[in-house]
Structures are given as C-alpha cells and as structure tokens.
Amino acid sequence: MKHALAKYMRAGVKEEQYFQILDYTKEHQFQQEAIFYLLEPDINQKIYGLPEYLSALNSTLLNESATLFRRRYFAKGRHAGFIL
C-alpha cells in the first residue's frame, strides 16, 4: 500500500474511478478498486481535502472577539484614562 496525496488526486464521474494529475496536461487513471478511499479531513489524506483558510478562522474569530471587548471596555469608561 502507498499513500496518494489528495493535492494530486481527483475522483471520476463513475464510482470507484480515480485519477492522479501528473502535470497540467497529463493524468493517470487508476484501475478499478486500486484506490482505497478513507474519509479524513486533511488535504494530504483526503480527496480534495479542506480549504486552506479554514485553519485561520479560529484566530480571526478570536481577534474579532478581543477587539469588540476592548471597544466596549473603553466605551464604558472602565479604565483609568492613562497608562503608567
């Protein structure tokens, strides 16, 4: 058994039909039942994988929450008005 990277794999129209993209002009079609498809949410293991921006969503949402907290904190006047 060998590992085929999802970045270069494509599912065909028919069931159990898979292709490996070698470059922009060439592709390799695998024989029927030559590929075992294991559903894993990782771009290096699953066909098509997850979008790259998905890992940044948590950081973005946390930053948004922190910004909103700071705005509300200063708007309510709950600070000393200066920094020591």
Image (cartoon, grey):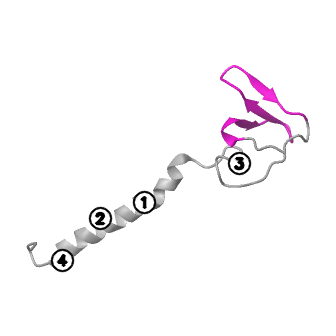
Q: Earlier in the sequence, mark 3 or mark 2?
A: 3
Q: The residue under label 4 is which amino acid type? A: Lys
Residue at the spot 75% in from the left edge and 41% down from the top edge: 4
Residue at label 1? 59
- Label 1 vs label 2: CA separation? 12 Å
Residue 22 percent location from the top left of the image: 71, 26
Q: What crowding class fits label 4: few (fewer than 14 Cα within 10 Å), some (14-19), or many (20 or more)? A: few
The reply to whether callout 1 and callout 3 are in contact (CB within 8 Å) is no
Residue 24 percent location from the top left of the image: 65, 22
Residue at label 2? 67
Dot 2: element:
helix
The N terminus sits in image quarter = top right
Magenta region: which residues? Answer: 5-31
Q: The residue under label 1 is which amino acid type? A: Ser
**Any part of residue 83 in sight:** yes
Residue at label 3? 46
Which dot marks residue 38?
Answer: none
- Label 1 vs label 3: CA separation? 24 Å
Q: Nearer the viewer, mark 4 or mark 3?
A: 3
Residue farthest toward the front in the current orientation of the protein: 1
Q: Quadrant of residue 68?
A: bottom left
